[in-house]
Image: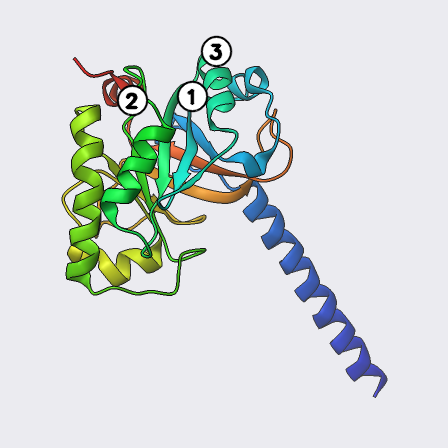
Amino acid sequence: MGGRRLWIAATAAASLTLLALGALWFTRFQPPRTHFPVRGIDVSHHQGDIDWPRVAHDDVAFVYLKASEGAGARDPAFAHNWREARGAGLAAGAYHYFTFCRSGTEQAANFLAAAPHQSQALPPVVDLEFGGNCGIRPSGEVFRRELDAFLAPVEAREHRPAILYLTPEFLAAYGDNLPQRPLWRRSIALQPGPEAPWVLWQYHNRGHVDGVRGPVDLNVFSGDRPAFLAFAKPEP
């Protein structure tokens, strides 16, 4: 019996060690900088007060800021974060959380009012995910119709294609109904597969950056710095 107890204790200790090492690996995971040298974050008011100069000095080149959600909600920190992030020298863009419960036309009006046109902005982003969305699950055809209704006025004002942010679950459910647009793939700690080529990759949802208290989403651009400059180039 004594030997069995020792074996159980040793197995438990080994399991705890593996769990601790796994947690440490996840916390520190980063894609190789030789392949993905351009780093960025995305934030909303949930991150609280942000020290943007410190962020800019922590190997962060770009930031996406939540501007709006649905047909009426707007992020109260957007204007302040936009001004401060740009002042710190970061490339900045705005994103909208798309809901199934309101029309694409209504949501586009909300986004366009929340994020006034900025010639120096990164391409606009529409956040497509199930987490926090309403319980409605429209057909693929209905979803595409409303997404197109959102994209048309937004892209007309910005004079460039929007980027579609996709979780794995959303891509699996509606991938066949998506328009041809640059993609921002969410794939935590695993490089996205080749089934849907991407321009941005969210690789962490609990990362740490100097100047931001608490966890923050971490992202990389798909190419090198010259390619990013071309991607970020303002409209003609």
Query: Is residue 156 rendered to the left or right of residue 137?
Result: left
Inter-mark Cα distance, 2 to 1: 10 Å
Looking at the rendered structure, which numbered label has been put on residue 172? none
| Callout 2–callout 3 Cβ contact below 8 Å | no
Picture layout, residue 195 above or below residue 2: above
Is residue 161 among the parts visible in the rendering?
A: no
Picture layout, residue 131 above or below residue 5: above
Looking at the rendered structure, which numbered label has been put on residue 87? 3
Q: Is mark 1 on a helix, strand or loop?
A: loop
Q: Residue shown at 39%/60% (left/top)? A: 134
Inter-mark Cα distance, 1 to 3: 13 Å
Viewer-side residue, 22 vs 133: 133
Inter-mark Cα distance, 2 to 3: 19 Å
Q: Residue shown at 45%/55% (left/top)? A: 132
| Callout 2–callout 1 Cβ contact below 8 Å | yes
Q: Name the residue under label 1.
A: 61
Q: Name the residue under label 2.
A: 228
